Image (spheres, grey):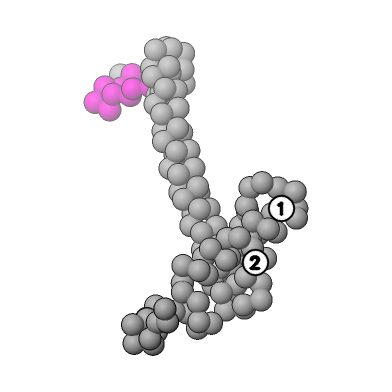
Amino acid sequence: MLLSPQSHQVSNASFTANGNPPRSFVIETSHAAALHASYSRRTKIKVDDFKFAIRKDPKKLGRVVELLNKEKLLKSARQGFDFNEGKLRKEAQKDEKDKDKDDRNPKKRKERDPPDVDEGKSTKG
């Protein structure tokens, strides 16, 4: 039984520029990355394996590199923000603890606080 061209029509919008459906591109790229990982005697696929698989398409490779750089930038910004905030919080807590310890120790309190001087009373006659 032969199919007529009218009964087997598919929209061209669901295909990529090379004529393959988009799902096929993902599967093919994943298989190529897995193959590259197996050549390297690894069972896990790394990002570099995907970069190697799409190395022949400069537009896609450029986009992947751009997104990876953005991810690194955001990750470092998050770490810097969390680290600084945590550091400031720890320093503030440490300062409060030191102040509490100083308040309990009379020698440290005398060193920190200046002596009280009454302006209205003078020692001279």
Q: Which residue is mark 1?
A: 38
Q: Is residue 48 visible?
A: no
Residue kind at label 1, given as amino acid type: Ser
- On the image, the x and y values in percent for residue 79 come to 50, 47
Which structural element holds mark 2?
helix
Q: Residue tagged by mark 2?
A: 53
What is the total number of numbered labels drawn onto the structure image? 2
In the rendering, at what x and y percent does residue 9 appear? 36, 83
- Looking at the image, which residue is at 46% across and 33% down? 91
Please rate how many residues cluster around mark 2, counting C-alpha atoms within 10 Å: few if below 14, some from 14 to 19, many from 20: many
Pick whichever, 13 or 104, lies toward us.
13
First along the sequence among labels 1 and 2: 1
Q: Who's the residue at 62% across and 78% down the image? A: 58
What mark, if any, has residue 83 been given in the picture?
none
- Mark whose residue sits in front, 1 or 2: 1
Q: Quadrant of residue 55?
A: bottom right
| Identity of the residue drawn at 49% across and 42% down | 83
**Magenta segment boundaries in residue numbering:** 115-123
Residue 99 or 113: which is nearer the viewer?
99
Is residue 30 visible to us here? yes
Report whether 7 appears left or right of 63: left
Up-down: is 112 above or below 37?
above
**Residue at the right extreme, as displayed:** 40
Residue 71: where, in percent of width, then height? 51, 59
